[in-house]
Image: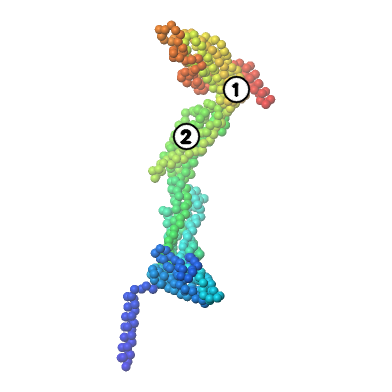
């Protein structure tokens, strides 16, 4: 009997083992979750008459919900069909529902009855067009947002007050309507070197609306040659209860300043008078964190002045971190009045990445005060016959910003020329921007080419600044017209000569000025005239 008991027990164990092996070999299609685990999300609703249908799902996952029948005690018969096959059905009253789990297609559906209206006729007791309000729910899905914060938006590796590490904090929020699981966060550094922390983290689950524990990572601040935008990127991957995969990404941009900056400073005297001197100083500083070699510094001169001494305006140097060097120091002599903006100085070098970088200085302004007298002689015509007359106009203009008592004279005439009539001088106080002129007529009797001697001007202002100017020297051509063999007079148009009052193309030379001939010498008029002129201007200003 003992042997029989042992044998039966052994047989039972063998049969159980065989059954387990058989079950393991069968296709395993059981779901990892049940319908009770589903977090539902309202999707669509409709009011159905007797026999009406509504659809749920996409083109490939289309379910038909139909109001099959109604009962007088308030039930509605609902069926759920897919591909012409009824998957589930139920008799439901208001507030009741049924759920269907379609494991083949990974769908979960809940049909809920909001209202049932029977419309029973009081006389016949029959239902007339009963309706049911149906609400459809689907399985909720998780969704994930990533938040990235940094301690700063901009980092400067050459400034000790700026952090030398980038502290970035990452967190995940489940913004969906269902729980997520097996959540993985992967951080991409954008090429930056990791200083502390990990680039990957895992979280078991996050419920809807839940935020993960923050993850902090530190990177070393890069040292680029030029301003650079770096992207901190993070990717989140997770699953829902059906093991469907969800993925999202987020990035944040930060700015990294260059590791080298050359600061060019150009300082200049702000305001001077025409008889004073302006001074310029140009210096450069390496505010970076590394040596810079073969830096070319170029400088340009402001308009309205000229160098007093010979100066080299281009130099090549090397600069250590934090080093400052004085590059140019020179003086300038004014040549015209006005306000002028200095061109920027530049510093350029080729970095180890084979790119050239250029830095510029500011552009200071220089105001030069004083009168600026410009003289010009023009002719009414430059080609005449012997014995004809030429009208000469002498114009003086004060292009400066100060008034000046000015005397202009024409005392010389070409040899062979005869003064006929007109004025040969003016004596006025020319205010800033004012012009004045005189004209005279001269006759040339002999053929030839004559250069008109320059008119001369001398001036003095209230600051006792004085000087002289001379005008241009236009050319007059006197020629005999060629013989035509006809005793009749011919017109100027037939002879090809210029008509009085019309200036020929040679007047380009006539209109030239002679600013470059300015010399600061004693004026040609007497001291008595200067005293009277200055006193007149002074009294006029006091009266105004």
Residue at which label 2 appears? 299
Q: How is the image coloured?
A: rainbow
Label 1 crowding class (10 Å Cα cut-off): few <14, some 14-19, many 20+? many
Q: Nearer the viewer, residue 119 or 258?
A: 119
Residue 378 at what x, y percent from top left?
A: 51, 18
In the displayed structure, does residue 433 sit left or right of residue 320? right
Are dots 2 and 1 in contact, CB under 8 Å? no
Locate residue 172, reporting x and y percent.
48, 62
Give the residue drawn at x 59%, y 17%.
426
The circle drawn on residue 430 is: 1
* Badge 1 element: strand
Q: Residues within 10 Å of mark 2 (few under 14, many from 20)?
A: many
Q: Residue furthest top?
A: 487
Please give the label number shown on residue 212: none
The answer to whether residue 157 shows anywhere in this view is no
Residue in view at x 48 percent, y 19 percent: 507
Q: Position of residue 27 (x, y in %)?
A: 34, 73
Q: Is residue 445 above or below residue 289?
A: above
Q: Where is residue 407 in the image (x, y as percent from the top left)?
A: 58, 18
Q: Indicate whether 507 appears above or below 486.
A: below
Depth check: 222 or 311 in front? 222
Q: Is residue 256 above or below residue 204?
A: above
Q: Quadrant of the N terminus?
A: bottom left
Q: In which quarter of the image is residue 278?
A: top right
Which residue does the image show at 48% across and 65% down from the upper left?
Answer: 44
Quarter of the rendering occupied by the C terminus: top right
Real-space CA distance between mark 2 and mark 1, rounded to the nearest whole angstrom: 37 Å
Q: Residue at x 44, y 74 (%)?
A: 89
Against 156, is 301 above or below?
above
Can residue 128 be seen from the camera position used here? yes
Disc 2, SS:
loop
Which one is earlier in the sequence, the residue at label 2 or at label 1? 2
């Amino acid at each position: 009997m003992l042997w029989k008991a042992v044998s039966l027990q052994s047989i039972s164990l063998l049969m159980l083992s065989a059954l387990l092996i058989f079950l393991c070999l069968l296709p395993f299609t059981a779901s990892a979750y049940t319908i009770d685990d589903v977090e539902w999300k309202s999707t669509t609703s409709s009011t159905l008459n007797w026999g009406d249908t509504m659809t749920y799902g996409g083109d490939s996952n289309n379910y038909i919900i139909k109001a099959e029948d109604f009962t007088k005690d308030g039930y509605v018969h609902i069926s759920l069909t897919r591909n012409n096959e009824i998957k589930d059905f139920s008799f439901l009253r208001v507030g009741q529902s049924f759920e269907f789990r379609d494991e083949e297609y990974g769908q979960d559906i809940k049909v809920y009855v909001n209202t049932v209206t029977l419309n029973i006729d009081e006389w016949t007791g029959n239902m007339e067009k009963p309706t049911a309000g149906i609400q459809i729910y689907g399985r909720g899905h998780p969704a994930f947002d990533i938040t990235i914060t940094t301690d700063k938006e901009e980092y400067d590796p050459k400034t000790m007050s700026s952090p030398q590490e980038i502290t970035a904090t990452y967190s995940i929020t489940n913004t969906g309507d269902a729980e997520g699981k097996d959540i993985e966060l992967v951080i991409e550094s954008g090429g930056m070197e990791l200083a502390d922390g990990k680039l990957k983290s895992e979280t078991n689950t996050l419920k809807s609306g839940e935020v993960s524990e923050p993850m902090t990572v530190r990177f070393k601040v890069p040292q680029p040659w030029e301003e650079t935008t770096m992207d901190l990127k993070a990717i989140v991957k997770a699953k829902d209860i059906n093991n469907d995969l969800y993925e999202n990404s987020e990035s944040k941009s930060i700015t990294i300043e260059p590791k080298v900056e050359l600061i060019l400073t150009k300082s200049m005297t702000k305001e001077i008078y025409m008889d004073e001197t302006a001074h310029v100083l140009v210096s450069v500083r390496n505010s970076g964190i590394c040596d810079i070699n073969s830096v070319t510094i170029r400088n340009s001169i402001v308009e309205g002045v000229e160098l007093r001494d010979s100066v080299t305006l281009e130099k090549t140097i090397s600069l250590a971190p934090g080093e400052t060097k004085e590059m140019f120091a020179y003086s300038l002599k004014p040549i015209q009045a006005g306000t002028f903006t200095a061109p920027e100085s530049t510093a350029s070098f080729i970095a180890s990445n084979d790119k050239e970088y250029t830095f510029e200085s500011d552009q200071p302004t220089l105001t030069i005060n004083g009168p600026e007298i410009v003289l010009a002689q023009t002719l009414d015509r430059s080609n005449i016959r012997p014995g004809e007359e030429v009208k000469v106009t002498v114009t003086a203009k004060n292009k400066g910003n100060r008034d000046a008592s000015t005397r202009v004279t024409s005392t010389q005439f070409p040899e062979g020329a005869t003064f006929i009539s007109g004025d040969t001088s003016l004596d006025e106080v020319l205010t800033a921007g004012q012009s004045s002129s005189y004209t005279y007529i001269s006759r040339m009797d002999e053929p030839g080419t004559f250069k008109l001697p320059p008119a001369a001007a001398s001036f003095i202002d209230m600051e006792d600044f004085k000087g002289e100017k001379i005008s241009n020297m236009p050319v007059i051509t006197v020629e005999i017209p060629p013989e035509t063999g006809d005793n009749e007079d011919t017109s100027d148009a037939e002879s090809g000569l210029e008509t009085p009052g019309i200036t020929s193309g040679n007047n380009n030379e006539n209109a030239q000025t002679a600013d470059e001939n300015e010399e600061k010498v004693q004026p040609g008029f007497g001291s008595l005239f200067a005293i009277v002129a200055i006193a007149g201007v002074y009294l006029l200003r006091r009266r105004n």
